[in-house]
Image: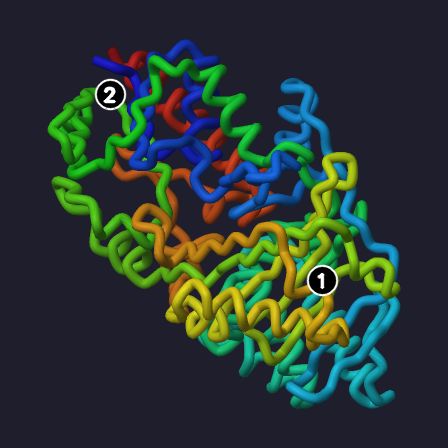
């Protein structure tokens, strides 16, 4: 009989397992995929010049202590996000704006003032403690900013934020969920920042999955069972039994479930989760969060004065960044194809997905048909909705009204089952740091629960 069985070997699950082991508990991890890391997946380039980050990629050394401690422990190398040069905003098919990175695009004075008002209002709300109001949870983010007087162009910008941050339209998530997400991430400005004040400050030279592999080594390969999708979880009162699709049975006193709550309904959990837990988790959705990573022989955009950053209302790429690692001769643009544009892009054939991305990059940077834009040395795309064991990214978003209505049960233990994942994190939700934070907390809950049982005995 194990002390703990962990389901899922993403960052939360691995951290939960490691923390439980450090507390002296016997632990096993079962993972559906043939790898560890979950939505952190670093794929080696055929050229040998480094890795393409198909999932999470960015960290901050001063604001995210857990992930940074692993960087130091494992001796990993990082590179700061390159910001020098012009950025581009594509407002529609025929209109684009070039502007210095980090400033408001050249809108009219009225539009700039309106954007700054909406931005500052949300920033102020996102620095308040506690849960947002039920009133704000029952209105969409789009309606919320329109109620504040957002002009059409500003409402479009807020929609772009929702697409970039969550893979959804601003009509598809509540204002409270958006604000709460910001509260857990040091405010709206920190989420949006690419410098030392924000979440997109540093990347790994040799892949973010190095962290997952390092933690897995600490947990021990013998304790991690890959290619073991779970079929059922059975609560027996004194213990839990977990049965995999291929018939393996794991018995443990406690279970830590580390998969997105959107996917709980796909597991056969006996007895069923309480009705309120089912209602809130069944109502969550994962965003259309996709990447196209275009690798080149040279960083050609820099010679034109661009830093590689662009944003677009039109899509399909709604935001892109330079994700080069110059020391590895790895030059790439990572393109986010999220929200409604990503939903439609994901339905295309692979060659069509590639073609529309390259054509958009050419349009953004005013490149002609002979440009290096059309001569990438490698091209990757990742559609997380297509992954059986992911079903989207980043973190599940609760339905309108559910964040506040079900706050007392969402993510809370049910019998011997404990829930972890970046969606439940109180810090850096949606980031690697958030996943580690939740994993730590889940293990702590298990340790405390087992100590209470021992005290009674």
Counting from the top left corner in percent of width and height, residue 40 is at 50, 41
Counting from the top left corner in percent of width and height, residue 134 is at 47, 68
Q: Which residue is mark 1?
A: 372
Quarter holding the C terminus is top left
Quadrant in the rendering for residue 267: top left
Give the numbered dot on residue 283: none
Which of the two residues, 324 or 185, is positioned nearer the viewer here? Answer: 324
Counting from the top left corner in percent of width and height, residue 188 is at 69, 60
Which of the two residues, 366 or 266, is positioned nearer the viewer here? Answer: 366
Q: Earlier in the sequence, mark 1 or mark 2?
A: 2
Quadrant in the rendering for residue 1: top left
Q: Residue at (80%, 45%) from the top-left corner?
A: 196
Quadrant in the rendering for residue 257: top left
Task: Please tell me how crowded label 1 is: few (under 14), some (14-19), or many (20+) other residues with Cα within 10 Å.
Answer: some
Q: Which residue is mark 2?
A: 253
Q: Residue at (33%, 31%) from the top-left corner?
A: 256
Secondary element at image label 2: strand
Q: Residue at (88%, 64%) from the top-left corner?
A: 305
Colouring used for the render: rainbow
Question: Answer yes or no: do the residues labelled 1 and 2 have beta carbons within 8 Å?
Answer: no
Counting from the top left corner in percent of width and height, residue 426 is at 55, 44
Q: Residues under labels 1 and 2: Cα distance?
A: 58 Å
Q: Residue at (35%, 24%) from the top-left corner?
A: 449
Q: Locate residue 315 relative to residue 452 in the image: left or right.
A: right
Q: Is residue 127 visible in this depiction of the protein? A: no
Rendered view: 300 above or below 323: below
């Amino acid at each position: 009989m194990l002390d703990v069985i962990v389901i899922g070997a993403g960052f939360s699950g691995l951290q939960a397992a490691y923390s439980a082991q450090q507390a002296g508990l016997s632990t096993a991890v079962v993972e559906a995929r043939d790898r560890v890391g979950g939505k952190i997946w670093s794929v080696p380039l055929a050229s040998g010049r480094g890795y393409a980050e198909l999932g999470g990629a960015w960290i901050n050394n001063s604001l995210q202590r857990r992930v940074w401690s692993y960087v130091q422990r494992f001796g990993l190398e990082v590179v700061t996000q390159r910001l020098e040069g012009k950025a581009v905003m594509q407002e529609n098919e025929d209109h684009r704006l070039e502007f210095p990175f980090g400033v408001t695009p050249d809108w009219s004075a009225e539009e700039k003032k309106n954007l700054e008002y909406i931005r500052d209002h949300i920033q102020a709300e996102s620095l308040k403690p506690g849960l947002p109001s039920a009133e704000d949870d029952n209105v969409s983010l789009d309606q919320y900013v329109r109620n504040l007087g957002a002009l059409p162009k500003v409402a479009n910008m807020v929609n772009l934020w929702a697409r970039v941050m969550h893979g959804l339209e601003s009509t598809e998530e509540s204002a409270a969920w958006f604000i709460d997400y910001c509260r857990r991430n040091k405010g709206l400005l920190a989420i949006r920042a690419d410098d030392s004040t924000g979440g997109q400050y540093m990347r790994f030279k040799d892949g973010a999955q190095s962290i997952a592999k390092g933690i897995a080594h600490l947990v021990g390969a013998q304790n991690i069972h890959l290619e073991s999708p779970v079929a059922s979880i059975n609560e027996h009162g004194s213990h839990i039994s977990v049965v995999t699709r291929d018939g393996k049975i794991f018995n443990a006193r406690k279970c830590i479930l580390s998969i997105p709550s959107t996917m709980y309904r796909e597991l056969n959990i006996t007895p069923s989760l309480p009705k309120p837990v089912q209602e809130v988790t069944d109502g969550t959705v994962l965003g259309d969060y996709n990447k196209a990573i275009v690798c080149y022989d040279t960083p050609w955009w820099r010679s034109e004065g661009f830093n590689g950053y662009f944003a677009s209302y039109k899509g399909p790429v709604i935001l892109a960044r330079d994700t080069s690692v110059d020391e590895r001769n790895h030059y790439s643009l990572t393109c986010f194809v999220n929200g409604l544009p990503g939903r439609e892009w994901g339905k295309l054939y692979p060659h069509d997905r590639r073609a529309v991305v390259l054509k958009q990059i050419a349009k953004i940077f005013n490149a002609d048909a002979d440009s290096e834009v059309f001569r990438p040395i490698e091209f990757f795309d990742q559609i997380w909705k297509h992954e059986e064991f992911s079903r989207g990214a980043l973190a599940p978003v609760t339905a309108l009204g559910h964040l506040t209505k079900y706050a007392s049960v969402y993510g809370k233990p049910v019998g011997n089952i404990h829930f972890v994942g970046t969606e439940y994190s109180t810090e850096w939700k949606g980031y690697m740091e958030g996943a580690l934070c939740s994993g730590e907390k889940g293990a702590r809950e298990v340790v405390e629960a087992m100590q209470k049982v021992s005290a009674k005995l």
